[in-house]
Amino acid sequence: MLSKKEIMSLAEQFTEQGYLCSEAVLLALSQYLNIQSEVIPKIATGFGAGIGRHGEVCGALSGAVMGLGLRFGRTLVSETPPDTPPYGFSTNIVNLFVAWFSHIRCRDLIGLNLHRAEDRKIYKDQQLWETRCRDIVRTTTGLAHDLLQALDTDSND
């Protein structure tokens, strides 16, 4: 099993290969969980840049939710105990993300609206993918790793 440092490095390597933030986090988490599927990273592609450059939920966070879903998501409705939300892992990762970054929206995290051409130029000129987004990918992957460890420990108690 990959260490936290290794999974964070792996996510960063995926960004260097050209994968989007959402794809890189999901790919790293799927490798950590030893889950392979032809839909990974395809399912995450549309979530990059806050869902298709709309600046909404950070793609790295979306990738983390999908990655955690590989481990804690359900296949059948009956798998969820009564009075237990099936999306509890999502609540946990969002809370960790907000505690770390203060925001979940891409445009708040980078200070730009990538739906606008002039902001995309600033993004490129300031190399925010390299200086800001890759760090968000790396950190988010680490937060998801920590949550996987914590939730797996809780389920073994």
Image (tube, rainbow, N blue to C red):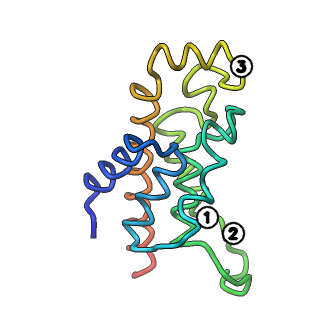
Marks 2/1 in contact by CB < 8 Å: the verdict is: yes
Q: Position of residue 21 (x, y in %)?
A: 51, 43
Q: Say if 72 sits above or below 116 in the image.
A: below
Q: Say if 32 sits above or below 138 in the image.
A: below
Q: Quadrant of the N terminus?
A: bottom left
Amino acid carrying label 2: it is: Pro
Crowding at mark 3 (Cα within 10 Å: few <14, some 14-19, many 20+)? few
Q: Say if 139 sits above or below 71 in the image.
A: above
Q: Say if 152 sits above or below 89 in the image.
A: below
Amino acid carrying label 3: it is: Arg
Left or right of 38, for residue 17: left
**What residue would you read off at disc 2?**
85
**What residue would you read off at disc 3?**
116
How far apart, in angstroms, are the residues tagged by discs 3 and 2?
Answer: 37 Å
**What residue would you read off at disc 1?**
88
Of the numbered discs 3 and 2, the one sitting upstream in the chain is 2
How far apart, in angstroms, are the residues tagged by discs 1 and 3?
Answer: 34 Å
Label 2 element class: loop
